[in-house]
Amino acid sequence: MRKLHFPALTPQNSEALRLTVVQSTFWASMAIGGYQTVYLQNNGFPAAQFGLLNAIACAVAIVAMTFWGMVSDRIGGVRKIVMLTLTLGVSLFALIPLIPTGQPYSALLFLIVIPIVNFFRSPMSAFVDNLTVRNCAENGLNYGTIRSSGSLWFAIAGILAVNLLIPAFGVSSTFFVAAIVMVPTILLAFFCREPQSGGRARKSRMGAGKLFKDRRFVAFLIFGFFFYVGTAFESNFLPYLMTSINIDSTNVGLVLSVRALMEIPFLFFIVKLRRRFQLRYLIMLAAAFMGVECLLLGLFVTTLPEFVVFAAVFGFGNGLFIGTATNYIYELAPVELRATAHGLFVSVSQIAGILGNLLGGFLFDAVGGKPFYLIASGLMFLSILVFAVSFIKKGETAPAAENN
C-alpha cells in the first residue's frame, strides 16, 4: 500500500502557525472578557463614574507601558514580558466579579482594584502585537494575514459569548472564562521565537529630540491625540448608547463581533493596498470610516440590526488602521528610535484616552447618547484635517510603502 507523504513544516511555517494560534486565542479571550463595561453598568455605574474609572485606568496604562517597556529592554526580550503580563493580567481580571456590589464602598473598590488590574492587562495587546510584528518582519511573514485570524476568532468568541455563555451563566462568568481561553496563548507564547531585534538597540545621540524635529511625526502625534479622544468616546460608551435607545447592552458583544469580522478583508489584503496607496491616505481613510460610523450612530440608529450594520463601517476602518499605523511610525522613525517612537504614540493615545473618558462620561450624561456620537464623529474628522494639513507645506513626499 502506497504511503502518503506530507511535507514537513518549515521553521518559517511553524512560526506562522504558532503566531496565528497566539493571535486567535488572545483575541478570543479579549472578546469574551469585553463585558466589563456592561458588568459595571449593571451594577449601577453611571456614565460619568465609568468615565472617571477609565481615565484612571488610562493613566495607569501609561505608567505600565513605560515600566514593562523598560523591563523588556533590560532583559533584551519580548516573549517573557508577554507571558508575564498575560498571566497576571487575566488572573487578576478573573477576580473582579468577587468585588462586593451594592455596598456604599463598592464604587471605591472598583476604582482601586480595576486600575491595579490594568497595570498588567493594558500592555497585553501591545506586547502580543510587538512579538507578532517583529517575528513577521524577521521571518518574511504577512502580519495582516496572521492578525486577521485574531479578528476572526474575536468575532466567533463574541457571538458564542452573547448567545450561549451570558444567557446561561450571566455577565460575571465572562471574566473567568476569558482567563481560561487565554491559557493556550500563554503556552504558545513560550514556544514562539524570540525576535532577534529584541536585544538592546543602538542608541541615537539625539534621542527622542530627533523625532520631535520631524514635522510629519509630530503631526502624526497630534492626529493620534484627536483620533484617540474620538475612539475613546466611540468605544467605551457603546453600552450606554444601547441602553439609551432601549437595546439590551449585553448585545454589545454581537456588535463588536461583526466589527471584528469586517476588519478581516483589509487586514488580509493590507500588503497589496500598501503597495498601491501611500500609508498616510490609508490612515486617513481608516479614520473616515470610523467617523462615518459615529455619524450614523448619532443620526439614524434605533434598532439592534441598524447598530450591527453601522458597526461594520467601523470595522473597515479599524482593519485599515491596525495594518497601517505601526508601519507608518516605523517608516518615520530611525531604526534605533522605532521603539521610542512607538512608545510616544502609545503614550499620546493613553493621554487622549484619559481626556476622552473623563470628558466623555460627563458629556454623555449632559447631552445624551446620539448627540454625543455626533461629537465623536466631529473629532474623527478633525483628526483627518490635522493630518492632511501637515502635508500641505513644503510639498513633502510621504514615506515609501513596505511589503510586510
Image: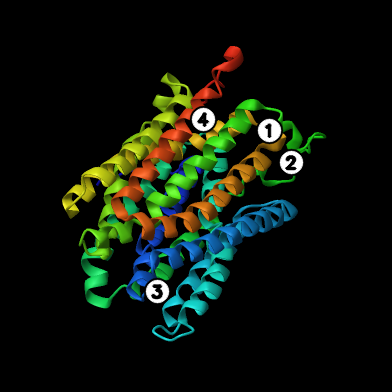
Q: Nearer the viewer, residue 44 or 363?
A: 363
Between 320 and 50, the one lying in front of the other is 50
Q: Secondary structure at mark 4?
A: helix
How is the model colour-coded? Answer: rainbow
User: How far across and how far down the image is residue 379, in percent?
Assistant: 43, 40
Mark 3 Cα-neighbour bin, 10 Å: few <14, some 14–19, many ≥20 = some
Q: Nearer the viewer, mark 1 or mark 4?
A: 4
Q: Which residue: 43% across, 85% down?
A: 100
- Please indicate, yes or no, whether residue 403 appears anywhere in the rendered image: no
Amino acid carrying mark 3 in the image? Phe
The amino acid beneath tag 1 is: Val
Furthest-top residue in this view: 395
Q: CA distance from mark 1 to mark 3?
A: 40 Å
**Residue at figure coordinates x 51%, y 43% from the top left:** 11
**Discs 1, 4 touching: Cβ within 8 Å:** no
The residues bearing labels 1 and 2 have C-alpha atoms spaced at a distance of 9 Å
Residue identified by numbered label 4: 386
Label 1: element kind: helix
Above or below, 144 against 256 in this view is above
**Residue 85 horizontal/vertical position (percent):** 57, 63
Q: Position of residue 223 (x, y in %)?
A: 53, 35
* Residue topped by disc 2: 201
Q: Nearer the viewer, mark 2 or mark 3?
A: 3
- Drawn side of residue 89 relative to residue 378, left or right: right
The CA distance from mark 3 to mark 4 is 42 Å
First in sequence: mark 2 vs mark 3: 3
The residue indicated by pointer 3 is 176
Under tag 3, what secondary structure? helix
Tell me the CA gap for discs 4 and 2.
Answer: 32 Å
Mark 1 and mark 2 residues within 8 Å of each other at the beta carbon:
yes
Query: Do the numbered discs 4 and 2 sit on residues whose CB atoms are within 8 Å?
Result: no
